[in-house]
Amino acid sequence: MKGGKSTKTNPKLALGPVLFHWDAERWRDFYFRIADEADIDTVYLGEVVCAKRRPFILPHLPAVHERLTAAGKEVALSTLALIMTGEEMEEIRQSIADPDLLFEANDISTASLLAGRRHVIGPFVNAYNEGTIAYLAQRGAFRVSLPAELSLSALQDLGQTDAGRSVSLEVQVFGRLPLAISARCYHARAHDLHKDGCQFVCANDPDGLTIETLDEEPFLAINGTQTLSDTYCSLLAELPLLQAAGIDCFRLWPHSCDMVQVAAVFRGVLDESMAVEEAQARLDELIGDVPLANGYLHGREGRLWVDGAAAE
């Protein structure tokens, strides 16, 4: 397969792109610190959610890319998850013109443009089965970031297939999970604004805006045009099970907590230098009273927390 045979040896820790609309200087400084201090193998960069935000980070992108690369990180440039205009499509065509850059395709049209060259398939592309993964690998994907809804048994089945063994398989293990993306901007509507005149109100919620049910219970979170889980996914205790299933790359989603220390906790468990109990206690200190969930992996509702490392 063109994607190349995955060795499935040393586990890799990856940092997904910032999904939220952070101040441009904060965004830049966040990645500078990741470059200098974080024990992370792969960093994904770019605007995934809303094309209107991209101009804010674009001036800092070359310097961030250079700093991360100089620090020995593998850097992949992430593309939009929803392309809605010809102009947006043309921007992607121009951005991927450099054959020396690595890209993460977050929709199938971008994956088509990247066919024949080494690239990553992001979690916004639905790759649930062996046939899809085999097709993507044949077209140049060397890593596939799997959807968050898959259970451990499904991951085990994929990891044992020829397609699953031919590529690096990545799973999302920390942070609010991206669930859906829309042409409508929920953040703007929440403030009685139209999308075209949104005033970038999504910047007021650096980790997303929690949405409650009619009974005033936290339910989901919104981030511009994106719907996220209200809970933070944490598969810290399940990392050994995921490795045994054939998963070799583990994605953290950036949040406003200390992501350098969050990465250190997950690295400690992956490298078996830190006990799961100690790691979980440290993670709880880092994120405060944020509710955690791991239900999807255990074949349950994604918002639930299932105690213990034994799935299903």
Image: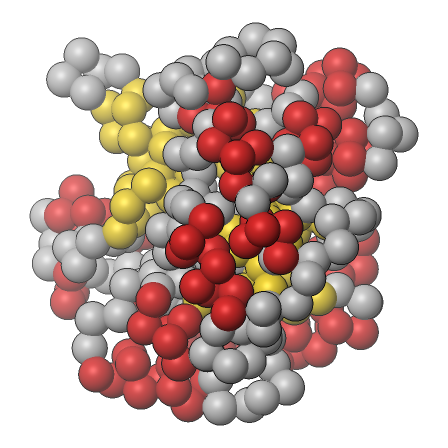
Q: Relative to residue 204, is residue 8 drawn left or right?
A: right
Q: Is residue 306 above or below residue 4?
A: above
Q: Give the farthest residue toward the top.
A: 307
Q: Give the farthest residue toward the right.
A: 273
Count numbered badges in the picture: 0
Quadrant housing residue 258: top right
Q: x%, y% of residue 128?
A: 40, 45
Q: x%, y% of residue 135?
A: 44, 63
Pick whichever, 168 or 234, lies toward us: 168
Q: x%, y% of residue 14?
A: 65, 51
Q: Identify which residue is drawn at 80% across, 74% down.
A: 70
Pick whichever, 17 or 261, lies toward us: 17
Q: Identify which residue is drawn at 52% across, 65% down.
A: 137
Q: In this view, does 119 lie above or below 205?
A: below
Q: x%, y% of residue 116?
A: 51, 81
Q: Which colour scheme is used?
A: secondary structure
Q: Relative to residue 115, is residue 3 drawn left or right?
A: right
**Residue 165 makes an appearance in the image:** yes
Q: Identify which residue is drawn at 81% across, 48% down.
A: 10
Image quarter where the N terminus lies is bottom right
Q: Give the farthest residue toward the front.
A: 162
**Residue 204 makes an appearance in the image:** no
Q: Identify which residue is drawn at 34% across, 66% down.
A: 108
